[in-house]
Amino acid sequence: MKVLLCTGRYYMGGIEKYVRDLAIELSKKKNEVKILVFFYIKSNDIDDFKSHGIEVIELKGNNGRSLIMLYKYFKTLRQFKPDIVHLNILPLLGSIVHMFYRKPIIVYTIHQMDYISAYDLFYRPIIKGVIAVSEKVKSHLQSHNFLNKSLWEVIYNGIQNNNPYKIKDYIKGDSVNLIMVSRLAQDKQPHYAIEILNYLNTNSDISYTLTFVGAPDVDDKQYIEKINKKILEYNLSDKVFFEGWQNEIFKYLINAQGFLMLSQKESFGYNVLEAMSVGLPIFSFDVEGGLSELHENNFTGIMIDDPICLAKEIDNVFKTERWKIYSENAFQSSKKFSISSMTDKTIEFYQEVLKKNNV
């Protein structure tokens, strides 16, 4: 099977991890795969693809309305002649290309809870299959009749199950490093992590630190300034560490004892799954989306919406035997989500969509 996997930009976030893992595993399973990046590549990780014989095509479009980019897209389709075009974003005018070149079947993986009605209008006649990364994403978008002519399937993201990294057992009384891995953006709500840390260091006899792995969005400069002011106000400068974007996050995860997930919405939570895979308990809000499909309150960690109540529970976990239980449960639960299983189910879905469309 010939598959063209398409993404917007390429620097290592959740969508890019999905595209990378799926592309390499599809190639291992004897499929011919190419990756198309509509905008720009900002990562050295594409070197991985060369060793698997996967070509990466960079169109360098400025936005989804770039006519030059759309022409290059059309040209790539004509030259490669894929059986499946697997979109992971929807360029606004990309549907026009498929009106002129109708041969490949279009599958779309939706990685977010939000939708724009204009995309539904443009793409509804074209997209034949939709992969939702969680049941919550599927039910939410179907309730709005989004792409309601398409065949839908839930396929969870996967990780490597042979991960060599594992955290050390926590010894009661030791200091605790909490970690948050995400964009430092307002929708991820890292300011609540500062409130949690302040409460813990003010009210607990355990010493807590906080590590942020991630960088702010361009338009979040003022938001980050407010966070830095809070850190100074609470006298936490020696307790908070900003590590920026990191391609290799596991070396940070294994030096933590708890993972914070405080977002407003998460379609699934790749970063949570990676944290669970090394045995990190998850301390989260009841985040809208698919988080509850991999993280369970009082099983893989704690899920409470109020930051102070969450902080109190975090402290209780580290003063009892619950940490060890949550750590083992998180580690074992992560094994349900493998790249191999994700890829096998995706291939089955490709075949189902092709069959339904008489291809």
Image (cartoon, rainbow, N blue to C red):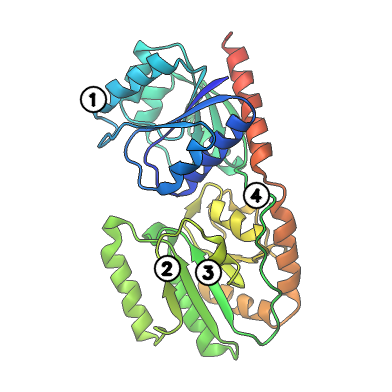
Type of amino acid at the residue the image marks with label 2: Glu
Mark 3–mark 2 distance (CA, rounded to whole Å) = 11 Å
The residue wearing badge 4 is 293
Q: Secondary structure at mark 2?
A: loop
**In the rendered view of the protein, which quadrant contains the N terminus?**
top right
> Which numbered tag is attached to residue 255?
none
Total number of numbered labels? Answer: 4
Vertical comparison of 260 with 264: above or below: below
Q: Quadrant of residue 36?
A: top left
Q: Residue furthest bottom?
A: 205
Mark 3: few/some/many CA within 10 Å (<14, 14-19, 20+): many
Mark 1: few/some/many CA within 10 Å (<14, 14-19, 20+): some
Residue 275: where, in percent of width, then height?
A: 60, 60
Q: Nearer the viewer, mark 2 or mark 4?
A: 2
Q: Secondary structure at mark 4?
A: helix
The residue wearing badge 1 is 67
Q: Secondary structure at mark 1?
A: helix
The residue wearing badge 3 is 179
- Say whether disc 2 or disc 1 marks the residue closer to the N-terminus: 1
The residue wearing badge 2 is 243
Q: Nearer the viewer, mark 3 or mark 4?
A: 3
Q: Nearer the viewer, mark 3 or mark 2?
A: 2
> What residue is shown at x 76% (from left), y 69% (from top)?
325
Mark 2–mark 4 distance (CA, rounded to whole Å) = 29 Å
Q: Are marks 3 and 2 in contact (CB under 8 Å)?
A: no
Vertical comparison of 294 with 237: above or below: above
Q: Nearer the viewer, mark 1 or mark 4?
A: 1
Mark 3–mark 4 distance (CA, rounded to whole Å) = 21 Å
Mark 2: few/some/many CA within 10 Å (<14, 14-19, 20+): few
